[in-house]
Every structure is written in structure tokens, then in C-alpha cells.
Image (spheres, helix red, strand yellow):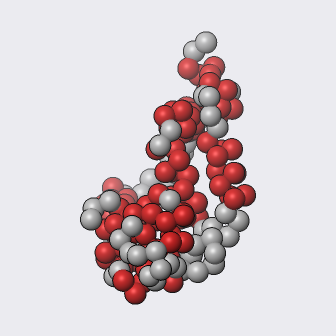
Amino acid sequence: MTYTEGLRQGAAASRRTSSKNVMELLIRLIEANPKAGTELLFLKWSDAVKDDEDYLDAALRHCFTNLLASVESGRPKPSRSKPSAARTAEQRRQAVEDLKQQARTAVILDFIMPNGKKLRDCTGAYAAQLGGAISRIAAAVKPNQIIGKVLSDEQAQRLASGIA
């Protein structure tokens, strides 16, 4: 079978060739954390995927299959009228700047946790139960302390990213 024949089978084929299913993992996380926001679900999902070689392989196969399908189908299709190179470069530069600004302003202590509170208003004990990057923040405070009263936004961000 050529890669294009396998491509027609899409992500379903990648699920059949992997021992674990990353979509089922995400569904279980959503069901277990119905009030969790996108960012918390992503953190929990990515921690689970990173910690398990079979999940990591499944995620990479799924991603690769989707990327290859996109390339093979010719997407993204070029527009009929080509924008000037300078305009396209400016649009890319602006998009990068916008993403950088969003990253700078995303404050992990303002993320809404499954209990409906901002992380800054949770205790260290509660945050430790959440695992992943959140547990690194929890480890920096005592179990009965309110995270936002002990840590600054910058300190929490550094802990979550593993820099601290």
C-alpha cells in the first residue's frame, strides 16, 4: 500500500495502528472535568500524552496523518488573486506579534479550574490534585495557602512552564 492509499483511510487508520486512542483520552478528560476550560483540558491531555509513549505515538500519528492529508489535498489552496509579497510578509509579522501579545497576557492564575474558581483563588491542596503544570505551582505553596496570595503571576507562570 502506498502512502496515498493509507492517506485515504485518514485518522481512522492511525487509530487502528496505535494501541491507544488520544481522542478517547480527551473525551474521558472532558467527562471527568465537565467545567474545565480549554487550557486546563489541554494541560491535562498533553501531560497524559507526554507521560505515555503509546499515547505520544498515537498523537504523532494522528497529527501526521492530518498534515499529510492537508498537503496531499492541496490545502491551503492559493487564492485566485495573489497578494503582494510585502503584504503577505506584513500579515505574517502582524499575526506573530498578535500571538506573542496573547502569550504575554495569558495569566495562568486567571485560568478557571474545574471547581469554577480562578487558580489564584484555590488552595495549594486543591491545585496539587489537578496534576501536570498546576501541581508544580501547588508545590510552591503550603496546602492551606491561597495560591494568589503567595505567588505573583510571573512566579506562577515560571513554575507552570518549568523555568523556576
The location of residue 151, given as percent across then percent down, is 35, 80
The location of residue 4, given as percent across then percent down, is 59, 22
The location of residue 71, given as percent across then percent down, is 52, 36
Using residue 41 as the reference point, say whether residue 31 is left or right of it: right
- Splitting the image into 4 quarters, where does residue 61 fall? top right
| Residue for point 39% across, 63% down | 136
The front one of 19 and 66 is 19
134 over 124 or under it: above or below: above
Quadrant showing the C terminus: bottom left
| Residue for point 54% across, 56% down | 44
48 over 83 or under it: above or below: above
Residue at the extreme left: 164
The location of residue 157, given as percent across then percent down, is 35, 70
| Residue for point 40% across, 76% down | 142
153 over 60 or under it: above or below: below
Using residue 85 as the reference point, say whether residue 16 is left or right of it: right
- Splitting the image into 4 quarters, where does residue 2 fall? top right
Q: Is residue 98 visible?
A: no
- Splitting the image into 4 quarters, where does residue 75 fall? top right
Disc tally is 0
| Residue for point 62% across, 34% down | 20
Q: Is residue 144 visible?
A: yes
Quadrant showing the N terminus: top right
